[in-house]
Amino acid sequence: MMERMPEMPATTALLRRYVGSPFALDVLTAVSCFALMVLDVPGLAAADNSLSGLTATFVLAAGSASLLLRRRAPWLTYLVALVFLAWLHELTLIQFALYSLGRFRGRWAGIAGTAVYVGVAYALFTTPGWPEHRGDTLSSFLSLVVPIGVLASGVGIAAYRQDLVRELQAQRAETAALQAVQEERQSVARDVHDLVGRELTMLTVRSEVLAVRSRGKPHEAEFEELSETARRAHLLLNEIIVRRADRRGATPGLEGLPALAAESGRAGSPVRLTVAQEARTLSPLRQAAFHRVVQECLTNAAKHAPGEPVTVTVSATRVEVSNPLPASAPFRAPVSTGTGLLSMEERMSSVGGTLTAGREDGTYRVVARVPA
């Protein structure tokens, strides 16, 4: 009877991790691009470019391999695609390259890459020798070459922005979870301080009374030591449980707003941030409330008005966040729990403030106020 082969859990786990990795997706992308381009091998071999069927296959394989670097060096893949466009009149690789530019370098890189591609393609189109089946009129050029680049780049930019929105949502969820943990920690600290602290206080008082009553008696030193130990225990309780619990994981204040603005800008919604000098004298609780309002507003702007500029103004008693309303609704309805506004209202209410939000003259405006 044949022996059963031993299982290799480490190898299986490694294989599963590789299959779900970004590099595995890049390999699949490169293979897919090569599979599409290899269909052009007969035409490439027949064209006047000194390539046989075998050499054309190797050249296309090398070009597809550049997609393995599309995350770290998408401009390299883009340059290879332009070479293929000029040399082999190959439009497949440029689609993957433009998508990669928009996907991993953002909107402006995608737009710049598309503009250069259209310019190069038009120059090649007007050059004698451009294949007739690619288009021999300007209308053919506009209906084939331009849409290929614009569509590929547009899809990549949309995926890039969607990733940033998901990242903002994940950070918001993480912040909410950390805040819940912090609130629970503070609640436990208060309970321990109120309950255990009361008993320690009573123990300290009683031990001090016993120490006074035992003066001049045999056990005076023991009662003095008991009283001192009780006092130290009470001080340690205040220091370790209450003060450290209040400091750990605190919500950022106004110093965290520039990071939020920069993150929103990377998501495609530029932020104009103005923080008055007197606002930095606000209490930590009010600064945390203002930070939470700005964070929620920037997240909502990225979801409901992508690409629109956001203005954030912070003073000692007021924070205002506004952005123009988009000309049209997002293509896909944003994922939203609908509790963001309520959360901001509760946060402002906790510091004695108010919050208003709504549309006003083509602008969505959120204003949070606290008493002077």
Image: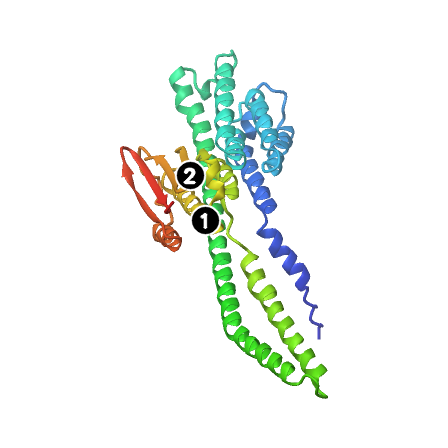
- Residue at the front extreme? 216
The scheme the figure's colours follow is rainbow
Mark 2 vs mark 1: which is more N-terminal? 1
Give the residue displayed 50% in from the left and 24% down from the top. Answer: 112
Secondary element under disc 1, as helix, strand or loop, is helix
Quadrant of the rendering where the N terminus is positioned? bottom right
**Foreground residue among 165 and 39:** 165
Give the residue displayed 58% in from the left and 25% down from the top. Answer: 84
Q: Which residue is label 1 attached to?
A: 169
Report if residue 307 is visible in the image. no
Give the residue displayed 42% in from the left and 37% down from the top. Answer: 312
Give the residue displayed 52% in from the left and 13% down from the top. Answer: 129
Report if residue 49 is visible in the image. yes
Secondary element under disc 2, as helix, strand or loop, is loop
Quadrant of the rendering where the C terminus is positioned? top left
Q: Label 2 sits on what residue type? A: Ser
Q: Which residue is label 2 attached to?
A: 315
Residue 7 rendering spot, x and y as whole percentages? 67, 67
**Foreground residue among 264 and 258:** 258
- Residue 234 falls in image quadrant: bottom right
The alpha-carbon separation of the residues under discs 2 and 1 comes to: 27 Å
Residue 327 rendering spot, x and y as whole percentages? 31, 32
Categorize mark 2 by other alpha carbons within 10 Å: few (<14), some (14-19), many (20+): some
Q: Which mark is residue 313?
A: none
Residue 348 rendering spot, x and y as whole percentages? 38, 51
**CB atoms at circles 2 and 1 under 8 Å apart?**
no
